[in-house]
Amino acid sequence: QLQLVESGGGLVQPGGSLRLSCAVSGLPMDYYAIGWFRQAPGKEREGVSCVSTGGTTRNYADSVKGRFTISRDNAKNTVYLQMNSLELGDTAVYYCAADRQLFSICSLRTSRYGSWGQGTQVTVSS
């Protein structure tokens, strides 16, 4: 059974940076696209970024393009989300999730993902 654990969240000032990590265990990560999602209070969960099995395809929500970078290290079974130039609107609980994939694609749709982590809080505040 696939397990995902997020880490790296915290409190940061606007304009600051954080790097989130998603550690995957239980099954080899090689066959899974991994996505990052976030949910702010009172809002629906939304896709932030995703990376395909081999890392060749990366997608980003328009709101984070140019500021966030996703990467994966299959040898370490870990996916990272580097978040720069953080804004107040980035405050949310961030989740990583896994989607079993045969192709080098990834989706920002929550319905694609069957395994989820517990989330890590990111708070951007002055």
Image: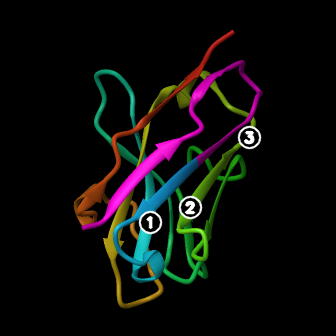
Residue 124's spot in the image, x, y percent?
Answer: 61, 21
Q: Nearer the viewer, residue 101 or 79?
A: 79
Q: Does label 3 or label 2 sit earlier along the sequence? A: 2
Q: Given contact means CB atoms under 8 Å apart, are the residues at marks 2 and 1 in contact?
A: yes
Few, some or many residues within 10 Å of mark 2 (<14, 14–19, 20+): many
User: Which residue is the site of mark 1?
Assistant: 34
Q: Does label 2 or label 1 sit earlier along the sequence? A: 1
| Residue 10 within the magenta-colored segment of the rendering | yes
> Image height check: is 101 above or below 78?
below
Looking at the rendered image, the disc whose residue lies closer to the viewer, 2 or 1, is: 2
Q: What residue lies at 31% left-to-right and 29% top-to-bottom?
A: 43
Q: Which residue type carries mark 2? A: Val
> Image height check: is 3 above or below 20?
below
Looking at the rendered image, the disc whose residue lies closer to the viewer, 3 or 2, is: 2
**Residue 116 appears left or right of 54:** left
Label 2 element class: strand
Q: What residue lies at 63% left-to-right and 71% top-to-bottom?
A: 73
Quadrant of res 72: bottom right
Mark carried by residue 84 = 3
Q: How many marks?
A: 3
> Image height check: is 90 above or below 95?
above
Q: Which residue type carries mark 1? A: Ile
Q: Which residue type carries mark 3? A: Asn
Q: Residue furthest front?
A: 26
Q: Nearer the viewer, residue 89 or 37?
A: 37
User: Which residue is the site of mark 2?
Assistant: 79
Q: Quadrant of the N terminus?
A: bottom left
Q: Which residues are magenta?
A: 1-20
Residue 64's spot in the image, x, y percent?
Answer: 60, 46
Residue 118's spot in the image, x, y percent?
Answer: 34, 41
Q: Does label 3 or label 1 sit earlier along the sequence? A: 1
